[in-house]
Image (cartoon, helix red, strand yellow):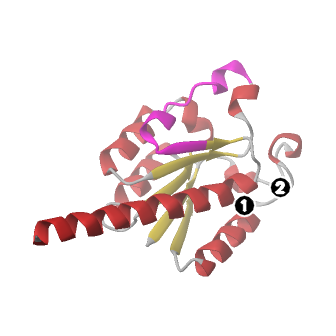
Amino acid sequence: MKIVVIQGPNLNMLGVREQNVYGPMKLEDIHSQMKAFAEQNKLEIEFFQSNLEGEIVDRVQECIGDADGIIINPAAYTHTSIAIRDAISAVQIPTLEVHLSNIYQREEFRHTSLTAPVCAGQITGMGPFGYHLAMVGMTQILNEVKMMKEQQAKAQQQ
C-alpha cells in the first residue's frame, strides 16, 4: 500500500518560520519520522511539497492509480482553494488533512477549511505528532478498505 504525503506552501520553511506557532522541527525531520513508520508497517511512502496551487492539484490527480491514500497539509490553501478541494473529491482516494497548529484557535480567516469536508478526517493542533497520527489513521483506513474489497470479492465468487 502506498501513501502520498502532499505539503502545501511555506511548509518547506518549517524550523525557520514562526517557531512559536509551528515549532522548531524541519519538514525533512517530519518526513524522516513518517518514513520510519512506513517502513515498520510495510507501507510505501512518497513526499511532495509545493508553494504552487496548480502543482498541488496536479499531484493529487497523479495519485489516481498510483496511491492508496493521501495525507495532505494544504497549509494556507486550506482556506482558499476550491481547486485543491475539487481535486481531492475527484480522485476518490482516502485523504487525511493535517495541520501543525490548531487552525480553530488562530485568526478567524483560518477557521474555515474548504478541503476538510472532502477528506476522511482532519488532525489539527498536534504539531509534528499530527503526522504520526495521520499515518496511524491512514493505515487503519487502508486496512479497512482492503478488508471490504476482499469481502466483496468473496461475495462475487459465491
Q: Residues within 10 Å of mark 1 (few under 14, many from 20)?
A: some
Residue range corresponding to the magenta coloring: 107-122
Residue 149: x %, y % from top left: 28, 65
**84 relative position to 102: left or right:** left
Which residue is the site of mark 1?
27
Q: Quadrant of residue 49?
A: bottom right
Give the percent coordinates (x, y) of residue 137.
Answer: 56, 56
The C terminus lies in quadrant: bottom left
Tell me residue 134's x, y (percent). 60, 55
Query: 119 and 151: which one is in front?
Result: 151
Q: Considering the image in quadrants, where does the N terminus appear?
A: bottom left
Using the numbered discs, state the Cα–Cα distance from disc 1 to disc 2 in whole angstroms: 8 Å
SS label for mark 1:
helix
Residue at 58% in and 25% down: 112
Q: Earlier in the sequence, mark 1 or mark 2?
A: 2
Q: Can residue 121 be found in the magenta stretch? A: yes
Most foreground residue, 32 or 133: 133
Q: The residue under label 1 is which amino acid type?
A: Leu
Marks 1 and 2 in Cβ contact (< 8 Å): yes
Say if the magenta span includes residue 22.
no
Q: Which residue is mark 2?
A: 15
- Would residue 45 be visible to someone looking at this image? yes
Q: Residue at x 44, y 66 (%)?
A: 143
